[in-house]
Image (cartoon, helix red, strand yellow):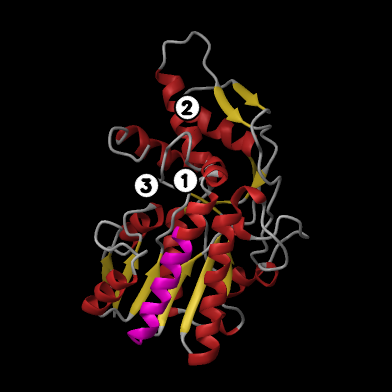
């Protein structure tokens, strides 16, 4: 089978490249330099010439809390265009299999916990990422509409907070873990007498963190596993453990020899918690083992240190 992957140079795409080594399938990894998914003519031509049997849609305009706050309109428009064009091209070319990636950050801000797949559209998302969230929610609806009308196998995975080696380590625009890794690296490399792990916010929010290579393994398994789509278009992928930002900061700090933590409560925390129900995932992936958080952090920090001059930052 020939599988075309959008967003091949991103966090998930790079992890997927690592995990498909030796695969029986043929994998084609695209990126924005090869095909601008915001331009439908380019998407139709690129997909049409590659003739994939399956599309894995990873590409997105994505960022951390502060990028979402500053660029809500841009993130809404870019993601709406990319998602619409990918599914529309798949439909026109009779590509009946497509797997897309959403995020638990797109769930309603005011809701009951734990959140599950049926609650995705039960209220507005947090204001901090409304543009990104609404665009991603439409991807879930778009997939369901095609499935209901044409019997396609279009589905979505909803991972919790991703982290891993090929992340965007921008302190301003990255997610919490890569941003903390970069700040800790700079702090540990400085000539300061007193060195700190500087944490934006109170450190109290809780998150279920997912090592990106684990998601890559789930993507590979999902290509051959069609049973869960009979229950829902989208499925949450999440470990059970919730970890506070303060604990995350301490774990990362240890990798850089930093023991002292300085909180900056004047910075926004975002949502306090987004506890996700992983019961559907455990039902269909009962034997799946998630990478322990400390191991995933160690591998990510080691990669960052070894490749500091080349990582996205």
Q: Is residue 41 above or below residue 260?
A: below
What is the distance, in whole Å, between disc 2 and disc 1 at their CAs?
Answer: 17 Å
Q: Position of residue 124 (x, y in %)?
A: 69, 60
Direction right: furthest residue? 112
Hey, which quadrant is residue 219 in on the image? bottom left
Q: Position of residue 6 (x, y in %)?
A: 34, 65
Hey, which quadrant is residue 249 in on the image? top right
Q: Earlier in the sequence, mark 2 or mark 3?
A: 3
Residue found at x 64% / y 26%: 264
203 vs 284, nearest the viewer: 203
Direction top: furthest residue? 193
In the rendered image, which residue does mark 3 sit on? Answer: 166
Callout 2–callout 1 Cβ contact below 8 Å:
no
Q: Residues within 10 Å of mark 2 (few under 14, many from 20)?
A: many
Q: Earlier in the sequence, mark 3 or mark 1?
A: 3
Residue found at x 66% / y 34%: 203
Q: Position of residue 246 (x, y in %)?
A: 64, 34
In the rendered image, which residue does mark 1 sit on? Answer: 296
Q: Which residues are magenta?
A: 78-94
In the rendered image, which residue does mark 2 sit on? Answer: 184
């Amino acid at each position: 089978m020939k599988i075309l992957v959008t967003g091949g140079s991103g966090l998930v795409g790079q992890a997927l490249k690592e995990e498909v080594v030796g695969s029986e399938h043929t994998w084609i990894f695209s990126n924005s330099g090869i095909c601008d998914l915001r331009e439908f003519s380019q998407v139709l031509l690129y997909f049409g010439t590659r003739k994939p049997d399956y599309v894995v849609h990873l590409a997105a305009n994505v960022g951390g809390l502060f990028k979402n706050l500053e660029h809500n309109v841009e993130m809404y428009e870019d993601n709406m265009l990319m998602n619409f064009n990918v599914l529309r091209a798949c439909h026109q070319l009779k590509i009946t299999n497509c797997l897309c990636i959403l995020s638990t950050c797109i769930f309603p801000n005011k809701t009951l916990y734990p959140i599950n797949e049926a609650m995705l559209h039960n209220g507005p998302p947090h204001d901090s990422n409304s543009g990104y969230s609404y665009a991603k929610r439409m991807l879930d609806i778009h997939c369901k509409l095609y499935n209901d009308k044409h019997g396609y196998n279009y589905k979505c995975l909803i991972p919790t907070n991703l982290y891993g080696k090929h992340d965007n380590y921008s302190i301003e625009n990255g997610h919490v873990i890569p941003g903390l890794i970069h700040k800790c690296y700079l702090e540990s490399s400085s000539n300061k007498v007193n060195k700190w792990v500087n944490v934006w916010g109170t450190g109290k929010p809780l998150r279920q963190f997912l090592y990106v290579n684990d998601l890559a393994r789930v993507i590979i398994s999902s290509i051959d596993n069609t049973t869960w789509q009979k229950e829902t278009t989208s499925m949450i992928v999440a470990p059970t453990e919730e970890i506070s930002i303060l604990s995350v900061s301490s774990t990362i700090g240890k990798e850089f020899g930093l023991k002292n933590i300085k909180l900056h409560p004047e910075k926004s925390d975002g949502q306090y918690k987004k506890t996700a129900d992983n019961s559907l995932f455990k039902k269909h992936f009962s034997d799946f083992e998630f990478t322990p958080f400390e191991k995933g952090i160690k591998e990510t920090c080691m990669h960052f240190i070894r490749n500091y001059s080349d990582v996205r930052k």
